[in-house]
Amino acid sequence: MTSTDQQPFLSIKDLKVHFSTEDGVVKAVDGLSFDLVRGKTLGIVGESGSGKSVTNLTILGLHNPDSTTVEGSIVLDGDELNGAPEKTLEKLRGNKMSMIFQDALASLSPYHTVGRQIGETYRKHTGCSKKEARDRAIEMLRRVGIPQPDVRVDDYPHQFSGGMRQRAMIAMALVCDPELLIADEPTTALDVTVQAQIMDLLKDLQQEFGTAIIFITHDLGVIADIADDVLVMYGGRCVERGTKEEVLRDPQHPYTLGLLSSMPALDGPVDVPLSPIPGSPPSLLNPPSGCRFHPRCAFAEKVADGLCSTERPPLEVVDGRGSACHLTPEQRRELFADFAGSRQH
Ligand SMILES: Nc1ncnc2c1ncn2[C@@H]1O[C@H](COP(=O)(O)OP(=O)(O)OP(=O)(O)O)[C@@H](O)[C@H]1O
Ligand code: SF4
Ligand SMILES: [Mg+2]
């Protein structure tokens, strides 16, 4: 391990991604910062529409420059990607950084065999021969657990089951041994057994290649399984971050507390009553003032002077741990005690 291994491999600073639409400006990501080192997995969790996919598509440069404004900094292995020429980004995509998309079928072409699609990605970045590309595709299909890969390499996507297509997409994302892998809900559509196999596969590949992984999910159970660190997003902002243990065992933000209360304890009794977070996610066209969570927060009235609805709580991060909430640590200890009690066993 070299001394640079603990330097952030990916560093996002004050990222803002705004879309111009007919109805106005959608502030999909609004001041997001985080770091990721090599060989680690960052879990990003948050409700639908919180900006998880937009953040990661922007890292890859896959946004429409005509209707999207991107501010802030995206540094990958020392290079600034925000504003980098499309040619540079294209070179990096699939090679240094790659993504497993939310929808496997939409990202595989129906007109080419699975093997050709995987092989062509490899050939484009390495300039190898067609024979070498095919061999590599077979090797990758074997690695992701496709039976008879030397035969299935010639199948078209529709000849694969849903789980196999997802594996094929993972094979394609990993064919060039990317140093950064972004997995956007890669297992949501799959049954539990296949989900578990794919998670194991990602862990194995990470161990083998030291890949840095961003894993996006709604599911805190998945986070508990795969992540080292966790970033909780709400309304285009980070509301809490820390190690997996810190965030799941000792949440510091009412929204994280709400997420945890809406799922069974990870290793606790299953008969604890669950309470989903009341209300709906914020509009990103006209986001709530102050703390974006205030219209849904059960604790907003505990903060003096109506601060929750007027002032944005800053995200103060010390040693990678932080949350954006006006409550004092003492208030949190007191108010969150019930939650901790219900999870003790
Ligand atoms: N091209 C676009 N133009 C306008 N608005 C957009 C565009 N792309 C995304 N959005 C909006 O940005 C917000 C964030 O979307 P995003 O896809 O990042 O959510 P998400 O957290 O990935 O949700 P999910 O869990 O449902 O996948 C949403 O309100 C979405 O409607
Ligand atoms: S700042 Fe106020 S509204 Fe926001 S999470 Fe904290 S207590 Fe709730
Ligand atoms: Mg998404």
Image (cartoon, rainbow, N blue to C red):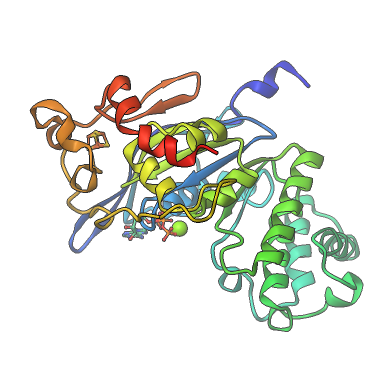
For the residue pair 307 and 178, the one nearer the viewer reads as 307
Residue visible at 89% across and 77% down? 151
Tell me the quadrant of ligand 1. bottom left
Q: Which residue is located at x 82 percent, y 64 percent?
A: 145
Q: Position of residue 280 (x, y in %)?
A: 26, 58
**Residue 71 shows up from this direction:** no
| Vertical position of residue 11 compared to residue 296: above or below | above
Query: Quadrant location of residue 120?
Result: bottom right
Q: Going by the image, does 115 lie left or right of 192? A: right
On the image, the x and y values in percent for residue 133 come to: 84, 61
Q: Nearer the viewer, residue 32 or 305?
A: 305
Q: Is residue 105 above or below residue 248?
A: below
Please tell me how many numbered marks the rendered image carries. 0
List the single residue furthest toward the bottom. Answer: 159
Q: Can you give x and y, in whole percent of width and height, for residue 100 in the image?
A: 61, 57
In the visual, does 177 lie left or right of 339? right
* Residue 167 in the image: above or below residue 29: below
Task: Confirm whether residue 24 shows in the render.
Answer: yes
- Relative to residue 188, is residue 151 depicted above or below? below
> Which corner quadrant holds the C terminus?
top right
Identity of the residue drawn at 20% across and 64% down: 22
Q: Is residue 10 left or right of residue 6?
A: left
**Residue 16: horizontal and vertical position, in percent?**
34, 40
Q: Residue at x 41, y 55 (%)?
A: 273
10 and 233: which is toward the camera: 233
Residue 158, by quadrant, is bottom right
Where does the N terminus fall, quadrant-wise?
top right
